[in-house]
Amino acid sequence: MNHVASDIESKIRISFTEICLTALFVGLATAFAISVTMKPESAEALYESQRIDSLVFRAAGEILRDGKSPYSIQNQVESIAARELNGNTPSFAIPFAYPPNSLPLFRLRALGQPELNAAVFMGTTVLFSLLSLTLICLRYLKRASARLLVTFVAAFWTPGLIGIKLGQTGHFVALVAFAFLLQHDRRPILAGILLGILACKPQYALPLGLVSLIRMNWRVLISAASTFVLMSLFSALLYGWSMWGEFWHSATEMNPTIYWMKSWPGVASLTFPDHVDLISKAAIPLYLLAMLLLSGLLIVLREKLDLLGMCSLAILITLVTSPNTHIYDMGLAFIPAIYITRQIGMISWPPVIVFLVYLLPNSVLTVLMAAILSGTQLCLLLLCLVLLVCSNVQKEHPNLTN
């Protein structure tokens, strides 16, 4: 198996042109991220354009610094009103939905000058997520044209640009997931640390943890569990154990951003607006059922899927069934896109089909168009899932390992 992987990697030749184009794509995307986040915008302007995500993250850090809970909407409103709006009440609020083990990371968002802090965070995560994706392409794709296409789309597609504009964590999550895939078999302890950090969005850490479990990579699991425990203990030491209860209470309440989600709850809430509360309550139980289904599929297909294939299956099922998947999280879908590109053997069309709809502007759509777009995206993910499974069931492929 290792000989097969080595043979494929040895056949990859990187031309000077490919290096220059990759550097151009990555450099332009990083420069865009820095320039956008360094641009000072008033809180009033952010509320008018409904782009308050970065404001909420900074407010969470400031609330933690004051010894209060970031999960309280009232605390958020009071903090933003006092520090950003001269005492005026904000026009709306969105929940802070990250678990307590991630709180020390968000405390860092309150350090220094706001624009500089945001620029360092966004520029760093965009740069290293794209570099990590490039390394995945080099490992699994033989054609330079396919590698360049994936890097180009990742650098400039609409969800990534929206994530930058919002100051969101999508590129950070993608970076950690990409690095986990790269290090899983070669440096399992480091991969486990990355998986433990990814638990800041547990809906994505759990399925990748199942991949490690099915592959019986115990060093990854032990390292991930240790990282998660240490981060949780550190958070509890700083902010107390009560944060877990407040997080769970917040997570089980109806999320007002459900209408913009790209997983099934978003499509369902736009299609059946009178049943949003029921859809919201069903989101976590159905996600857990999906993880049981994923476990079964991974066990059945473990002899046919390599690491990339197992991670692709895990990510696709999660993006479809997660209780909280937004457009800026869709960067994770590059992993299954790379897998299908490799399996089908086409040069460029699989990534194009998967991401074509996402390249359409969708920040100013009506509710009806948003429902159609979200449903189309969900169908594309399901199609990608079917292609992934069928490519292994219908014909034999070399079982590659890193």
Image: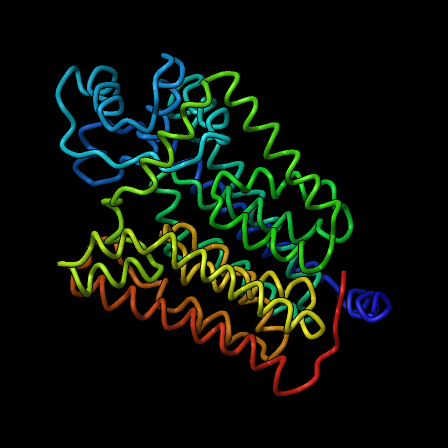
Residue that protrudes farthest toward the right in the picture: 3
User: Residue 254's x, y, as percent?
Assistant: 25, 45
Image-based side of 267 in relation to 118, left or right: left
Name the image quarter holding the N terminus: bottom right
Residue lying at 54% horizontally and 48% vertically, measured from the top left? 205
* Total numbered labels: 0
Q: Is residue 323 left or right of residue 340?
A: left
Residue under the image location 58 percent in, 73 percent down: 341
Quadrant housing residue 377: bottom left
Q: Which residue occupies the foreground of this view, 81 or 147?
A: 81
Q: Quadrant of residue 8?
A: bottom right
- Residue 196's place in the image compared with 377, above or below, is above
Seen at 54% across and 45% down, the residue is 27
Residue at the top extreme, as displayed: 66
In the rendered image, the quadrant that contains the C terminus is bottom right
Q: Which coloring applies here?
A: rainbow
Q: Position of residue 20 (x, y in %)?
A: 63, 54
Give the residue displayed 19% in from the left and 58% down from the top: 365
Does residue 37 lie above or below 89 as drawn? below
Residue 43 position in % (x across, y down): 22, 27
79 to the left or right of 238 = left
Where is residue 360 shown, x and y percent of the image? Answer: 31, 63
Quadrant housing residue 191: top right
